Image: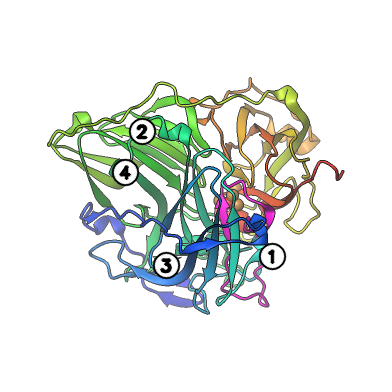
Amino acid sequence: MLVKQSGASVPAVLDVNRLPKFVDRLTIPPLARSSGMKQSPLSSGIPAPLYRISMRAIERRIHRSLPPTRMWGFGATSPGATIEARRDRPIFVEWVNELPGEHFLPIDHSIHGAGRGVPEVRAVIHLHGGRVPSESDGYPDNWYTPGKSALSYYPNRQEAATLWYHDHAMAITRLNMFAGLLGLYILRDETEDALSLPKGQYEIPLILFDRSFRKDGQLYYPVSGDPAKPWVPEFFGDAVLANGTLFPFFDTEPRKYRFRVLNASNSRFLYLSLSNGQAFWQIGSDQGLLGEPVELKILTLAPGERADLIIDFKAQAGQSVILRSDTYAILQFHVSDTPSADASALPARLRDVRRTVEREAVRTRLLTLEGGGDPDDPTTRTQPMLLNGAYWHDPVTENPTLDTVEIWSFVNVTEDAHPIHLHLVRFQILDRRPFDVFTYLNERELRYTADAIAPDANEAGWKDTVRADPGMVTRIIIRFEGFAGRYVWHCHVLEHEDYEMMRPYDVLASTDRP
Ligand code: C2O
Ligand code: CU
Ligand code: CU
């Protein structure tokens, strides 16, 4: 198959399934190390450890049969080094842009925010799931060019969770993240320490994303047929990588492991299972531990979502087990047959997750997920999907007051599931309820067609990203805690996010009124 990019013929796309599988070892991103202490007005002058992390062009081998792949990473790696932080112990990160002067992926200059006058290479890093002051949150318009940097202050005043950091630059996030600008941020606390979950070499980050490659091993991101509008409405790669390696293997002992799983794909939902049909336990979601472990055989993970899993390989001594998503093989576990002492626990109770009750809400907002064109129809193909009918640059319409509770109801009239993410906050899912889309589109009247469905057990904890299914009203309940200021909410399908499915929102200090 010949594909066209920027008008020129490029080598055909690599058939990843012709590569030998499970011949490369899973790599674990290194731990980030602080370079000293810093104080700044951001921390009211209180000193905190400083990490200095540079975005750079790197080359990395994703498979032993391929030449190194050019990508963008942090320091020398992509995914970037894992930042480990503790609750209530703030840190600073200086995110340094040392990227080259040109982008290597197809920018769509017709998209708002990526016009010809805007520098091609720009980045701004956001801590996804972090309760972070607005000025440190990585606002999409606050990007900066090579040679510049931004200092972020992360107070870590929140419960333990698997957070992650990634680029958020206006209108090119899908390309910058596809290039590799993402990494994990693990926040720990005493509640979790007390549980004796598997740790150290038995606690493994698993950052999953799909990619396609050219025959020469370079990243391949598709373009539309229109050279003036190369944006594509979604990206689905040919293979799902684990920690940036194609079809790795991982040597395990016959015992329990804890996996911090992140779906960092642009668009792909993952449906994770083990090849032997074995069950596993989910102990945490986006914003930390669940109330109790949930036994699963298949885990659905939307882009942006995280799952904290326990897999017990005890009964698999001497065997191999493949982690897969649908029919995509991702990673093979080689379980040794040497017995292993396992002192770790899988507690029946993990923590108290108190439900936020609906009557605490001071306001309900009905927000549509709508628009989008027909991918096969060139005249409508490039219509954006919108949040409540508004574009990014329209005036702010969501402006909750600090320390109040609201219910946001996402009315999804599109044919896609959209993972909706709010910065700053954690929330709970109330329910999802099917409605008559046709009636809604024609009369703007919500006519429910069935009863509301409670969230699945593994979605019943604290979340920051929620799957809004097509034809459903998905309701979440949110307490706006932490900081007043300007934040964003958006779809975490990066192609949607870059093209208008993102909105600013304001958290108002309780004294200012809308
Ligand atoms: Cu994971 Cu607004 O981001
Ligand atoms: Cu976020
Ligand atoms: Cu979307």
Q: Which mark is residue 197?
A: 2
The residues bearing labels 1 and 3 have C-alpha atoms spaced at a distance of 30 Å
Q: Nearer the viewer, mark 2 or mark 1?
A: 2
Q: Earlier in the sequence, mark 1 or mark 4?
A: 1
Dot placed on the residue nearer the N-terminal end, 1 or 3: 3
The amino acid on which the numbered mark 3 sits, given as a three-letter code, is Gly
Query: CB under 8 Å between callouts 1 and 3?
Result: no
Look at the numbered discs 3 and 4 and tell me whether their residues touch, using CB distance below 8 Å. no
Q: Between marks 4 and 2, how big is the CA–CA gap? A: 10 Å
- Tell me, for residue 200, which label it has, or none: 4
Number of residues whose C-alpha sits closer than 10 Å to that of mark 4, classed few (under 14), some (14–19) or many (20 or more): few
User: At which x and y percent is residue 200?
Assistant: 31, 43
Quick one: quadrant of the C terminus? top right
Q: Position of residue 213 (x, y in %)?
A: 37, 64
- Which residue is at a point 74% across and 47% down the rendered structure image? 484
User: Is there CB contact under 8 Å for labels 3 and 2?
Assistant: no
Pair 3/4: label in front: 4
Range shown magenta: 112-139
Q: Tag 1's secondary structure?
A: loop
Disc 3: which residue: 75
Q: Is residue 175 left or right of residue 485?
A: left
Which residue matches tag 1? 112
Q: Nearer the viewer, residue 45 or 248?
A: 45
